[in-house]
Amino acid sequence: MIGDVLTSIILFEALKQKYPTSVLHFVINPATLPVLENNPFIDEFIYLNNDTVQSVAKFYKFLISIKKENYDTVIDVYGKLNSALISLFSKAPIKSAYYKKYTSFIYSHTFNRLTKPENKASLAIENRIKLLEPLNVAFSPIFPKIYLTDKEIDASKQFLEKNEVDLQKPLYMISVLGSNKQKTYPLNYIVELIDEIAKQSNSQLLFNYIPVQKADAKYVFDQCQVSTQKKIFFNVYGKSLREFLAITKHCTALIGNEGGANNMAKALDIPTFTLFSPYLNKHNWFGNKESKKHIAVHLADFIELSDKDLLRAKKDPKTYYLKLKPFFIKPLLNSFLSTFE
């Protein structure tokens, strides 16, 4: 997933700071390459696609190619059987991973995941950096970064201006939908928040959605007030992930459901206002050090939730989402918007 990949790239920057002459390779699914292009800390990408993983013969051939690299260190952030086998075949003297009883024998160093942040960052970031302890890399406040070219940024600017977007006015990217229904704020609630954004700010709005979500995104558009619809550029969107990134780079902020888009906006240094699903632990993906530029909202911020509630929320997120009324969110949202007016 893109959020996981983005969180993992901080390891490369941390390692290059500590060991400037090190050579660093990243095993990735090719689909995630767009968020990694031009990263100055990664020396080489090694592609592992689903077709290779699902074929015993192809995956074994891949494992042999890993063995031939003679790695000194392998950092396994994935923690699944496939990555454990990669670590095993690497024969690296140092192999670091999160502790799991059935794979721990493969690694030279294993770690239990933190359950509470120790450095005011998100747990995702703090747990990633923890994997570098065998290499004497201490925690430092490094955050994921995406690198766009000047050509990409200029092309997206021309695209927006061609579609009559005024870049002198606030421009908000709205993540209307989550990656699935469990991560999607109720549509009638998101409509109310979008109307509030249009009402409280002299803004223009872009919708972030993928093709299979277009019908739901159009439903949200149709439910918005007519005055709000006039501010939405519904058909202005990137046709590729890199185009989406370049367009987002021109946005004042990204607002909406938690997911890859929010993580990408952060990596582009764009402010975000994020709505977390009730069953998620907000602290996994949001740290106190981000609070100056980013806002994250969770039902637990307004209503006391027990551990049992969180378990129930995973089975029945809709019921708990309905408790997160827009009137809870609007004061925080308006305060966030006021910083850009």
Image (tube, rainbow, N blue to C red):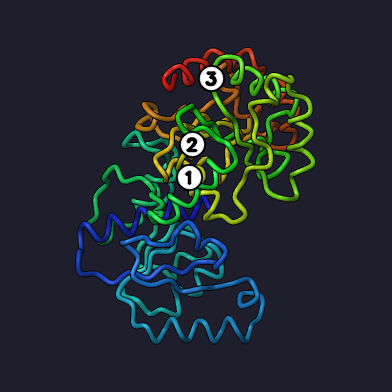
**Quarter that holds the C terminus:** top left
How many C-alpha atoms fall within 10 Å of the one at disc 3: few (<14), some, or many (≥20)?
few
Residue at coordinates 60% horizontally, 16% vertically from top-left? 303
Q: Is residue 331 above or below residue 85?
A: above
Residue at coordinates 28% horizontally, 55% vertically from top-left? 14
Whole-number angstrom distance, CA of label 2 to CA of label 3? 14 Å
Q: Which residue is mark 2?
A: 251
- Residue 333 location (% of width, % of height): 53, 19
Whole-number angstrom distance, CA of label 3 to CA of label 1? 20 Å
In what element is the residue under mark 3? loop
Q: Is residue 142 above or below residue 273?
A: below
Residue at coordinates 62% horizontally, 87% vertically from top-left? 57
Instruction: Work out whether residue 257 or residue 214 is closer to the camera in this orientation and state it.
Output: 214
How many C-alpha atoms fall within 10 Å of the one at disc 1: few (<14), some, or many (≥20)?
some
Q: Earlier in the sequence, mark 2 or mark 1?
A: 1
Q: Is residue 187 left or right of residue 45?
A: right
Q: Which residue is mark 3?
A: 202
Which marked residue is nearer to the observer: mark 2 or mark 3? 3
Q: Which residue is mark 1?
A: 157
